Amino acid sequence: MFFALIESSRSALISIYAHGLRSFLTTLGIVIGVASVIAVVSVTQGMSSFIGDTFATLGSNSLTIRSFTPFEDQMKGIRARLTPEDMELIEKRGEGIASITPVLYATRSSQIKYGSQTAFSQIMGTTYAFQEVSQSYISIGRFLAQSDNDTRRRVAVIGEKVRENLNLPDNPINEYVEIGGEWFKIVGMLEPKGEIMGQSQDDMVLTPYNTMRSLLGNQTRADISIQLSLTETADAENVSQQLTTLLRNAHDLASDEDDDFVIQTAEQLMETFDTIINMVTIVIGGIVSISLLVGGIGIMNIMLVSVTERTREIGICKAIGAKRHHILLQFLIEALLLSLLGGLVGLGIGYGLGTLISNSIPSFPPANIPLWSVGLALGFSGFVGVLFGILPAAKAANLDPIDALRYE
């Protein structure tokens, strides 16, 4: 049986080589299908891997709490808020919390000025604990101190993107920028963190929390975000449930009312993005896989033609003792090899396309081909070859040797 397998493979390769152009055109559908699938998977998986690495820098043990108002309530003028009292409640009664900080965004203007230069940035008020909670560290100067917050000092820590947008010196420490009509002294610059989903993480300005509150003035109660990091032994899910109970009670929400806040972890955000990317991969992969079926039909048609062309050859083989399973095996292996060769060519082209797409888009993550996609592409190619090679192989194996020898 092993000898028959080797001889059938050798015969199939000789036949494929002897009709090179026809073999190439036969496998073209497989090549296009596999190349399309691999290109889609390599781009989406590269993006998924990049997102995973980026979210890992946000800290797997951090939580962010934001207010949430359904669209219907927003249209009615209702607005949910998180207050400093909510943060104090969490700080006092929350368990498993290592650090906690409020974040108050500038609502009037996100404009920052330096000399004649003006830029728009994410300006927020926070405390010294923000450094640990968000894993944002200083490259030059210092971070915000507790004394800055206590005395409402006009100081700021900026990101690399802000320095670029304002044409600040490489070392911007002790330079003054204008925020909300007041002058702020730059005391530190954050380490660059790059972009996530096209959004720069370095385009931010940090000021003391109490300073930001004074800038906003006596307007309607400010809506803050709360960021916190957990202790090593704390379970994020348990802490989220506990904080949900605390905030629901503090906001006097009935059991049938929805939460007016959202608690998110970096892992939850990453899982959401992964789900979206996987769904896109499956849908697009399913669409382009149709060409694999088209390629399989092409293989079947050409193999049927090949059976007709080689009818006398089959008759001679049977006349000198070839069994039905030998003929069946020979044509099946030929169809399988055609599909696998097409799959290998498509694999190379698909990776090349994925790399080309990734490199042609600025700031796009590099293409990444997981091993499962390679196995799936080649496995499906082989399956298509066997599936659509069965009919021609069976037709060849069932030929009567006498009728085959008479065939002109």
Image (cartoon, grey):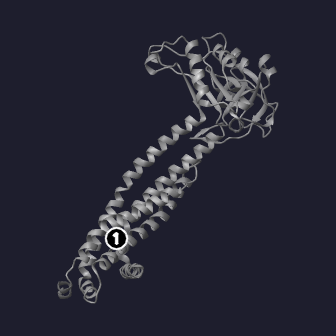
The kind of residue tagged 1 is: Thr
All told, the count of numbered labels is 1
Residue at 79%, 35% (x, y): give it: 172
Classify 144 as above or below 28. above
Residue 81 appears in view: no
* Residue 132 image point, x, y percent: 73, 31
Give the residue pinned by disc 1.
Answer: 26
Residue at 80%, 25% (x, y): give it: 145
Residue 147 placement: quadrant? top right
* Residue 155 image point, x, y percent: 77, 24
* Residue 226 image point, x, y percent: 64, 23
Residue 66 placement: quadrant? top right
Q: Nearer the viewer, residue 290 or 335?
A: 335
The C terminus sits in image quarter: bottom left
> The residue tagged with tag 1: helix, strand or loop?
helix
Residue 201 appears in view: yes
Could you tell whether 302 is left or right of 134 in the image?
A: left
Q: Nearer the viewer, residue 379 or 168?
A: 379
Residue 174 placement: quadrant? top right
The N terminus sits in image quarter: bottom left
Could you tell whether 130 is left or right of 11 in the image?
A: right
Could you tell whether 301 is left or right of 58 in the image?
A: left
Classify 134 as above or below 372. above
* Residue 366 image point, x, y percent: 58, 53
Residue that extends furthest to the bottom in the rendered view of this protein: 320
Q: Nearer the viewer, residue 158 or 69?
A: 69
Q: Nearer the viewer, residue 233 or 379?
A: 233
Residue at 46%, 68% (x, y): give it: 345
